[in-house]
Image (tube, coloured by chain):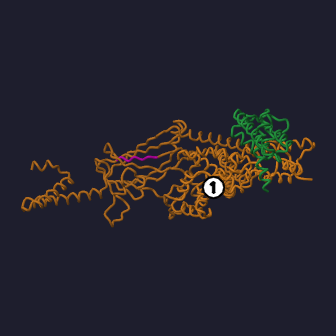
Chain colours: A green, B orange
């Protein structure tokens, strides 16, 4: 139970960072984001992504365009805003720091610095 | 075999099996409930619905089939994830904050009109929610107030204007004082969207002044009338329509019978009475026919319309009703033409005067001949045997067929000369002056003169073949000054230039006549003159007495004044001027 909770917490933080990273590569449709996340085994169900996207969009990190689709309703294609890009670069930095911190805590400071 | 339903999800039309639909609906409700207290619930749910629509469409294309079944929905749901899976990813921290703020708002109740439970405008049920009672008690109270002098109507109208409608979900919850129980709502997305829009609009509406609400209320009132007419009012209208059918049918039957009667099947003498006596012989059939059409068709139309209202059935087709309209218009045209034709016969006026000098007498007696004038035909129809002298038929002036307005008028005036003259004026209308004169000449009027007694016939007759064209007979009796006239009782109603009813003998006397005398100022009642003279004498005597007592006995000034006043009053009444006293 405790393990599960910690896992969830970790995933949550990383999911947001990953989504921003995926979108930063270019205009993308929600289901494509899902496909990528799924292949990375980060996401279990699609339903989770929509609240996240909406929140990011409302915080000004994302914007979207409606694009006509051949099969079904028009799709929302997401892009990163300037704010989003700025935040992503900060997150990148944080991730570097975190990765460094994790590496050090796992194998000791000496092994990595030398 | 399975029943399919067509749904609109994410603006995509999808055929879905009923069981699959139920499953999908339950899932979507779950999703909506989950995001209900989320700040962006609408957008999230719309995104999810769009995605579901897309997934379903893809599956249909992949499997090359037409209808979504339960398996497809299950597949979609597993891909989207159940609600409990959502929780694990998206953070929950902001939710309690939101919820508590909502709860605070709901805690106090607000007065709204309940549009879901309304009879007229939802005022009563709104009050009931506010007071935590059942709406029926409030309704009964309002109805009672309405019967007590209409006060309830006024209160209702004012509350209607003041209380806002509970439109959005939020307002409905505020109205009912419900806690933030968001589990219960099961509205579909479109309704939610609508509610949000209205909520925004409501902010403006609350700021509107009272006057602006009037328009809204009037609109709602008419909407209510519309609902009433299509609802419970319909039964009322059907009952009314039923009555109209019964009475209308009765009326139509009566009309047919009456027409038949006029046509002469039963009684042709109806044309002798006014106003049918105006009509020329030759035109009777045409006028009767057109009158029948003019009356019959509207009643028929009313009955047919009532049948349609009562039974929701069209009694006759359009062609027939159009034909009826044409016939009716034709009838109106004929009737109008005939009416114009008849009225044109009243266009010209002619007067014929005949003067007869009467022998001079000191006293004339004026009487009315109450015995009816009977023609030969009348005598036969009434079985009056002319040879039996003891039979007298008198006219009571009231009964009998009213043929036409044919009363006479007698005017008694002061003669210019010393001769007594009777001037008879015969007047009539006609199409031309000549025909008017002809009609006047055809008046047959009789009076008899026997010594000093003049007996007038109360009516005039028209010679055979003459139609009523507003003929009138005016008799002008010119009498020299000083001549007495005795008016017999029956003549009262024909002598019309004097207030005959004022002239009575003293109480107790029951004479059937009144005595008059011609003076310089016109005809005067002798009894009245006598009374006036008597009165004058009395006043004179009193004046004389007072003047004597004033001269002889000295009294106190107060009494002196009252005597002087009385003397002045008496003098005024007698017509003695104040100046006269000065000279004396």
| Residue B374 vertical placement versus B420 (above, below) | below
The residue that label 1 is drawn on is B103
Within 10 angstroms of label 1, few (less than 14), some, or many (20 or more) residues?
A: some
B501 with respect to B102 (left or right): left
Please, which residue is most extreme toward the bottom here?
Answer: B508
State the image quarter where residue B492 is shown. Answer: bottom left
Res. B244 in view: no
What span is in magenta?
A: B473-478
B215 with respect to B94 (left or right): left
| Residue B135 vertical placement versus A38 (above, below) | below
Prevailing secondary structure class for the magenta stretch in the rendered image: strand
Depth check, front residue: B182 or A114: A114
| Residue B326 vertical placement versus B234 (above, below) | above
State the image quarter where residue B400 is shown. Answer: bottom right
Q: Secondary structure at mark 1?
A: helix
Depth check, front residue: B64 or A37: A37
User: Residue at coordinates 51% horizontally, 50% vertically from top-left?
Assistant: B405
Say if the magenta span includes residue B167.
no
| Residue B504 vertical placement versus A43 (above, below) | below
Q: Position of residue B402 (x, y in %)?
A: 54, 54
**Chain to which the residue tagged by mark 1 belongs:** B
Depth check, front residue: B43 or B220: B43
Q: Position of residue B499 (x, y in %)?
A: 36, 54
B534 with respect to A44 (left or right): left
State the image quarter where residue B55 is shown. Answer: top right
Report how many numbered discs are placed on residues in the image. 1
Q: Position of residue B134 (x, y in %)?
A: 62, 64
Depth check, front residue: B513 or B310: B310
Q: Position of residue B542 (x, y in %)?
A: 16, 60
Res. B439 in view: yes
Say if the magenta span includes residue B477.
yes
């Amino acid at each position: 139970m405790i393990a599960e909770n910690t896992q969830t917490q970790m995933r949550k933080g990383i999911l947001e960072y990953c989504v921003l990273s995926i979108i930063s590569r270019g205009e993308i449709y929600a289901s494509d984001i899902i496909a990528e996340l799924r292949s990375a085994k980060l996401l279990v169900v699609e339903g989770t992504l929509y609240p996240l996207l909406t929140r990011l969009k409302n915080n000004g990190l994302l914007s979207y365009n409606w694009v006509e689709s051949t099969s079904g309703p028009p799709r929302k294609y997401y892009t990163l805003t300037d704010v989003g890009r700025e935040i992503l670069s900060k997150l990148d930095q944080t991730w570097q720091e975190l990765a460094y911190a994790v590496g050090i805590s796992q194998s000791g400071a000496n092994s990595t610095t030398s | 075999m399975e029943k399919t339903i067509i749904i609109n999800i994410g603006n995509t039309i999808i055929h879905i099996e009923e069981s699959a639909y139920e499953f999908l609906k339950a899932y979507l409700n779950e999703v909506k409930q989950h995001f209900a207290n989320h700040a962006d619930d609408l957008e999230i749910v719309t995104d999810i619905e769009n995605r579901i629509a897309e997934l379903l469409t893809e599956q249909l294309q992949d499997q090359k089939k037409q209808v979504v079944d339960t398996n497809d929905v299950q597949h979609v749901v597993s891909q989207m994830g159940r609600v409990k899976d959502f929780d694990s990813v998206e953070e929950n921290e902001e939710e309690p904050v939101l919820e508590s703020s909502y709860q605070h708002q709901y805690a106090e109740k607000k007065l709204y009109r309940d549009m879901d439970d309304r009879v007229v405008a939802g005022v009563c049920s709104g009050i009931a929610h506010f007071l935590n009672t059942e709406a029926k008690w409030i309704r009964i109270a309002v109805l009672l107030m309405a019967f007590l002098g209409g006060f309830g109507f006024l209160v209702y109208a004012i509350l209607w204007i003041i209380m806002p409608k509970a439109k959005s979900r939020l307002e409905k919850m505020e109205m009912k004082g419900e806690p933030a129980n968001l589990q219960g709502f099961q509205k579909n997305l479109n309704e939610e969207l609508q509610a949000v829009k209205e909520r925004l609009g409501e902010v403006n509406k609350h700021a509107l002044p009272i006057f602006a609400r009037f328009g809204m209320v009037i609109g709602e009132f008419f909407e209510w009338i519309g609902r009433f007419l299509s609802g419970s009012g319909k039964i009322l209208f059907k009952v009314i329509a039923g009555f109209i059918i019964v009475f209308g049918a009765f009326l139509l039957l009566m009309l047919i019978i009456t027409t038949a009667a006029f046509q002469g099947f039963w009684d042709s003498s109806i044309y002798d009475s006014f106003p049918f006596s105006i009509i020329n012989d030759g035109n009777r059939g045409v006028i009767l026919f057109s009158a029948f059409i003019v009356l019959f068709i509207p009643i028929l139309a009313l009955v047919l319309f009532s049948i349609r209202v009562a039974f929701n059935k069209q009694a006759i087709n359009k062609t027939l009703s159009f034909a009826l309209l044409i016939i009716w218009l034709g009838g109106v045209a004929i009737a109008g033409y005939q009416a114009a034709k008849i009225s044109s016969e009243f266009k010209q006026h002619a007067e014929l005067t005949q003067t007869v000098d009467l022998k001079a007498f000191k006293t004339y007696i004026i009487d009315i001949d109450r015995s009816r004038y009977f023609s030969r035909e009348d005598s036969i129809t009434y079985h009056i045997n002319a040879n039996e002298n003891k039979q007298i038929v008198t006219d009571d002036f009231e009964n009998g067929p009213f043929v036409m307005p044919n009363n006479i008028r007698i005017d008694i005036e002061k003669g210019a000369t010393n001769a007594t003259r009777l001037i008879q004026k015969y007047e009539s209308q006609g199409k031309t002056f000549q025909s008017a004169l002809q009609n006047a000449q055809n008046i047959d009027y009789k009076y008899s003169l026997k010594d000093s007694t003049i007996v007038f016939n109360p009516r005039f007759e028209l010679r055979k073949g003459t139609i009523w064209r507003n003929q009138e007979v005016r008799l002008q009796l010119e009498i020299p000054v000083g001549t007495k006239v005795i008016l017999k009782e029956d003549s009262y109603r024909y002598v019309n230039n004097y207030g005959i009813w004022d002239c009575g003998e003293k109480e107790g006397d029951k004479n059937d006549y009144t005595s008059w005398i011609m003076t310089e100022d016109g005809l005067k009642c002798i009894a009245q003159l006598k009374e006036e003279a008597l009165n004058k004498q009395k006043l004179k005597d009193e004046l004389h007495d007072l003047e004597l007592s004033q001269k002889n006995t000295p009294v106190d000034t107060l009494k002196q004044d009252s005597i002087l006043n009385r003397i002045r009053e008496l003098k005024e009444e007698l017509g003695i001027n104040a100046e006269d006293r000065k000279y004396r």
